[in-house]
Image (tube, grey):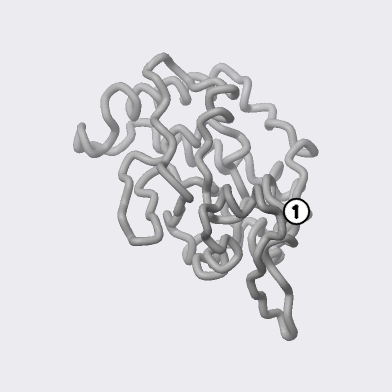
Amino acid sequence: MLRLDRTKTPRPLFWETNAFRKFLDEWVYFHGVEGGMRRTQRRAPNRKQLEYHRDLAFSFLLEANHGKCVYSEQRVDRKSGVVTFHRPEADAIDLRSKVSPDHYWWGVCDWSNWVLASRSIQLAKGTSFPVATQRSPAPPETGIPSDAWLELNRDRGLLLDPYRDDPAWYLTYLDKGRVGSREHPGLEAQAEAEGHDRGAITIKIL
């Protein structure tokens, strides 16, 4: 896992189209106002639109990460790679296997949450996303959450995000492709993690 620069991959052109904004409006209304699948007992009505836009995002993310999985650095293509979400769109699982059914449907509205992973890594990751303290609150029911709200209410995820974290401070690379964990030397980073070993957690999940 290497440090990546998200600023080199701005939002794809479809992000500002009327069709995509309409999709996000419907997505937010279904999950934020109607209560999502748990309350309505039905599948998201615009699920096909999500898959369509994930397919459109593939080439953007493939270029951003030099044709590799953001987590494992495996070479990927359309058969072996998949556009997924760093914070899962639903059923986030913590370190004690407790499931949070509604977290994080609003991450679909956050371009920085869209990542390219190998299918094997995504299968291992599933919806695991432990956090250091409490999970972030759901956005207010006032439409698509703003970038400012998303940034302000981002919880302290323990799974390393190569677009936000520098993995070199948490991981050490050993012989024959093995990876070990290391304690971040910064006191602020240690405090943010509330004593958790983010490197070890990332290795275990992925």
43 is higher (above) or lower (below) than 148: below
32 is higher (above) or lower (below) than 197: above
When asked about the image quadrant of residue 160, the answer is bottom right
Residue at the disc numbered 1? 3
Neighbour class for label 1 at 10 Å: few (<14), some, many (≥20)? some
102 is higher (above) or lower (below) than 177: above
User: Where in the figure is residue 48, as x and y percent of width and height?
Assistant: 43, 37
Q: Secondary structure at mark 1?
A: loop
Residue at 75%, 53% (x, y): give it: 3
Residue at 53%, 45% (x, y): give it: 156
Residue at 42%, 54% (x, y): give it: 127
Residue 139 versus residue 49: which sits nearer the camera? 139
User: Where in the figure is residue 14, as x and y percent of width and height?
Assistant: 63, 27
Residue 179 versus residue 111: which sits nearer the camera? 179
Task: Identify the residue at the far top of this view.
Answer: 142
In the visual, does 204 lie left or right of 137? right
Residue 67 versus residue 163: which sits nearer the camera? 163
34 is higher (above) or lower (below) than 110: above
Quadrant in which the N terminus appears: bottom right
User: Where in the figure is residue 190, as x and y percent of width and height?
Assistant: 61, 54
Quadrant in which the C terminus appears: bottom right
